[in-house]
Amino acid sequence: MTYPQPKYQDFHLKGILHISPDDAFRLIANDEAVLLDVREPEETAVAKADLRQPAIEVPLSGFTRSTKFSQDRIIVVMCAHGIRSAQVCEWLLGKGYTNVLNLDGGFANWQAMNLPVSIY
């Protein structure tokens, strides 16, 4: 389900695990994971992943040293194309989080796989 090298994006940081959008969707639907959307407000104002449990939205520009998340479930981090989310994964791992996955290819790949999307 997870893999060490991205399949849908060129950008990669060593030590980051990736997950495909369809596998991420299954984990989130089964309440095994939460989706952390790090896109900026102007991006999420256009379209979002449509989930029973809404994504946690913390834009990359809003991350601070005190930003904290529950560690009781896997955190799947998503941005537009997987670059910023990989950077956030690296930051979270550095802060001691262990169950962190990068959404491979980001929201663009989520849409390409025809997963649920709300368009505004």
Image: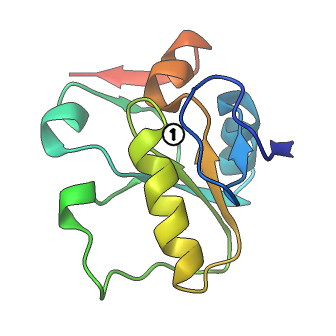
- Mark 1: which secondary structure? loop
Q: Which residue in the structure is indicated by mark 1?
A: 51
Q: Amino acid at mark 1?
A: Leu
The residue shown at (36%, 24%) is 118
Q: Position of residue 27 (x, y in %)?
A: 74, 48
User: Which coloring applies here?
Assistant: rainbow
Q: Nearer the viewer, residue 115 or 63?
A: 63
Q: Position of residue 16 (x, y in %)?
A: 67, 56
Q: Position of residue 115 (x, y in %)?
A: 58, 21
Q: Nearer the viewer, residue 108 or 53?
A: 108
Q: Is residue 66 visible?
A: yes
In which quadrant is the N terminus drawn? top right
Residue furthest right as drawn: 1
Residue furthest left as drawn: 42
Q: Nearer the viewer, residue 53 or 1?
A: 1
Q: Nearer the viewer, residue 26 or 63?
A: 63
The residue shown at (71%, 32%) is 20
Label 1 crowd (10 A; few <14 / some 14-19 / many >=20) = some
The residue shown at (49%, 32%) is 106
The residue shown at (30%, 88%) is 66
